[in-house]
Image (cartoon, coloured by chain):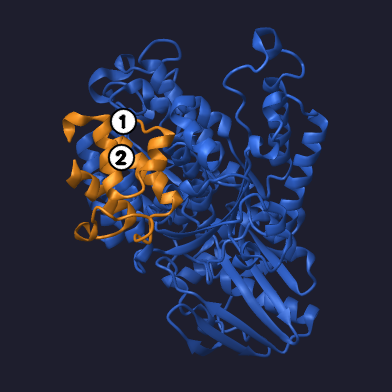
Chain colours: A blue, B orange
Amino acid sequence: MQELEKILNNVSLDKSASLISAIDKADQLKEGFDVTLKIGVLRNYTIEGIEPYLKYHLYKSGIKAEVHFGNYDMILQEVMDPESHFSKNKPDLIILSLKLESFLPDYETGNWNFHDVRGQLSELLIQVMNNVSGPLVINNFISPFYSMNGIIGDVAENSNQRRIQRLNSFIEDFAAKNSSQVMLANWERIIRKLGEELSIDYRFWYSSKSPFKKDFLNEYAKVVANIGKILAGKVKKCLVLDCDNTLWGGIIGEDGMDGIKLDNHEFPGKVYYDFQKSILLLAERGILITLCSKNNEEDVMDVLENHPHSLIKRKHLAAWRVNWKNKAENIISLSEDLNLGLDSFVFVDDSEIECDLVKKMVPEVDVLQVPKKIYLLPSLLMTHGQLDTLTETNEDRQRTILYQTDAKRKEASKSFATIDEYLYSLDLHAKIHLVEDQEVARVAQLTQKTNQFNLTTKRYTEQDIQQFGKLTDNAVLSLTVQDRFGSSGLTGVLIAKKENSTGYIDSLLLSCRVLGRKLEYAFVDYCLKYLEGQWSIAKWMAEYMPTKKNAQVANFWSEMGFQIVEQQEKKSIYFLDGSPQQIIDTTFIKINE
Amino acid sequence: MEEKVKEIMSLIFNVDIEDITEDSSPDNLENWDSLRHMNFVNALEEEFDIELTDEQVTEMMNFKLVLAVLKEISPSSA
């Protein structure tokens, strides 16, 4: 086992000493992390206590978190001064943590004007948003635990309770309107979950301006860490579901269609019905649904297609393994089929034995066991946190169909003698152009999610992509692919920068769904020629930055005719004098026709 | 109890148990700052299932004083 994992396994979050000590040790480690995430915290109260919790949750996903706190209550100074420690540190993720009591000293007396305060808050949020260059996590406020004005005063138009609710609506609207950069850590929800007793430390609030107890800090840290994980590309993309006692109660092979529990009204059938509902919600957001069940395939498909209460149908599945083989092998085979890394899978099963087997054989897979208290099943996936994205795109909503078309392509490829014959038969059409407004979300998402065919693995937000699009010496080009089976959607991105007469390729990535069709060669060739025309460029520089996952593109620039200039541990630098020479035949791909 | 407190101090302040004396305090332990003091208070409360008052929190500024406070709260475990 890795050192980092060993250290973190010793932590019990109920024991502060075990956490603090483990984080001290993990801080010293150089190995075991895939990526670094710099978090900058702007705040108007003491929130340093969150650091070990933030680090704990990020370290657990192999993300080296560096947390830097801006000076106490100096939010605008920190963001507006380019020389401030905060600005110089260039955080990848910014937390703006505001406590109303610090923002508004007259809060408790109720002697404040709602419109003034909303105005000040709006000004602050806008200034911070415009002066930081990364994603920003804000929070709403905690409404009072008791009425300052008695029973009657509590419901008055201008009670603290009602005014804070209105401020919160304003904050939520702000996050919704600026969703390409701003995310909400919902303090009200955390408070509702934990309650005052477990959340607020009045003793340390009055003595040290440190209001939160460890349970609150932990929940707050989890929200931020989940956002950090998505930014760092640590997302889950595919569910692998067992069937018996997971999608329905009972065993189809024994209890039969009439005997299994799946129902919109009765317990326990309603639990499974609601669980299926939650799965469909994830499917709509682009999570792939697969089955892995020890059963006869026809029995399972019969339930999906013909059971009156089965919400999940065959059409929702990207793939399935319904057989009597070992589940670990089945998951590996699903991962090969869908071309997704094992660490993007979440496996759900009721059997402890199956869960243990998968944990042991394929430790990369996230394993969730169906709770013994079965009524907790419907929230299992909704509270997971990593089955999420920061943007929602058309590609997400169509993803299952896209994967199903891929399966048809694979089937078709078997009837050709050579790969080239097959590629010619596909009638491939590629659309390549500068990124358009409606594509920005998808482009950002691809930079966040693509791990395998990704030369530099730089993660960008929508805001970053928009920014690149505006600058004349930057270019973001997108690739959209279609063939005789259908569209694969926007599946490739190239980001380039120009300095004098040199072009730098900042990022190049392709979704794993379109690999194996030589599109990458045609895409890069077209982009470079296009940009040369626009920018009058004499030479190109490109990089390959190795990660655990992108070994398949280690030689890509050489294949494109680039010369290696420098090979370091963390990156290899390549050089191309003049235009790319098409070395690999891609004449079967029609570009922008 | 003394041993348990030493163990907690060693974990929170990142020092060897052998180096903790009755005079160990924020003055001679590099990591014993105001933030870690709060962690230390939390850890003691978790371990001994107690709640320290604000006075006790400000009073316990070296190992000897920590023990004195804890003994005052639960003389039986001393």
Q: Amino acid at mark 1?
A: Ile
Tell me whether circle 1 and circle 2 mark residues in contact (CB < 8 Å).
yes
Point 38% across, 53% down: residue: A343
The count of marks equals 2
Q: Work out which quarter of the rendered image holds the C terminus of chain A and state it.
A: bottom right
Q: Image quarter for residue A378? A: top left
**From this viewpoint, is residue A387 visible?**
no
**On screen, A223 above or below A553?**
above
Label 2 crowd (10 A; few <14 / some 14-19 / many >=20):
many
Tell me which chain the residue with mark 2 is part of.
Answer: B
**On screen, B38 above or below A168?**
below
**From this viewpoint, is residue B30 visible?**
yes
The residue beneath circle 2 is: B44
Tell me which chain the residue with mark 1 is part of.
Answer: B
The residue beneath circle 1 is: B50
Q: Amino acid at mark 2?
A: Leu
Point 76% across, 48% down: residue: A126
Relative image position of residue A187 (x, y in whole percent):
56, 34
